[in-house]
Amino acid sequence: MSKICPCGSGLSFSDCCEPFLLKTQNAPTAEALMRSRYTAYVMQNADYLIETTAEATRKFHKKADILNWSKNSNWIRLEILFSSETIVEFKAFYFEKLQLKIHHERSKFVNETGKWFYLEHE
């Protein structure tokens, strides 16, 4: 039996975010990329998070900062509030220093040559 994907899709990890994290497939939608990026935070995969950030905004995201937030947080769940072709609004629930926190963001994504990238948040 396969473990359930951390992104909250209800699918097994191997049928959901794993192929994206292993780079054997590209996320087919902005929402799928968002879910895989959340899973990358859960798994402390900062390289994937950098690689799936658009070149135009990548310089604003430091790998050390991403890794620090990822390692110092106990990720609980992802809730998708809204999803369109290029926008995903979500809440990511996590514990930091035994305190429950919610990261609420409305993210913009861009498709460059058939591959989705996180661009920025509104």
Image: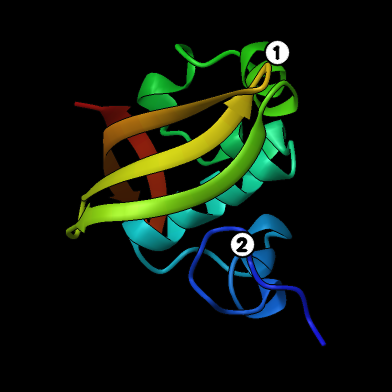
Whichever of callouts 1 and 2 sits on the residue coming sooner in the sequence is 2
- Residue 43 image offset from top left, x and y in percent: 74, 44
Asked if residue 76 is positioned above or below residue 121 in the image, the reply reads: below
User: Residue 88 got which mark?
Assistant: none
Residue 29 percent across, percent down from the top left:
35, 64
The vertical placement of 81 against 59, above or below, is below
Q: Secondary structure at mark 2?
A: helix
Using the rendered view, name the quadrant where residue 95 is placed: top right
Front one among 26 and 42: 42
Q: Residue at x 53, y 76 (%)?
A: 10
Q: In this view of the protein, which residue sits in the foreground, 17 or 94?
A: 94
Looking at the rendering, which quadrant does residue 25 occupy? bottom right
Tell me which corner region of the image, top left, top right, bottom left or bottom right, holds residue 90: top left
Q: Which mark is residue 64?
A: 1
Percent across and percent down for residue 3 are 76, 74
Q: Is residue 4 left or right of residue 102?
A: right
Residue at position x 64%, y 45% in the image = 40
* Residue 114 in view: no
Q: Is residue 46 visible?
A: yes
The three-letter code of the residue at mark 2 reads: Phe
Kind of residue sitting beneath label 1: Ala
Q: Position of residue 114 (x, y in %)?
A: 37, 61
Name the colouring of the figure. Answer: rainbow
Q: Which residue is mark 2?
A: 20
Q: Residues within 10 Å of mark 2 (few under 14, many from 20)?
A: many
Residues packed near mark 1 inside 10 Å, few (<14), some (14 to 19) or many (20 plus): few
Quadrant in the picture for the C terminus: top left
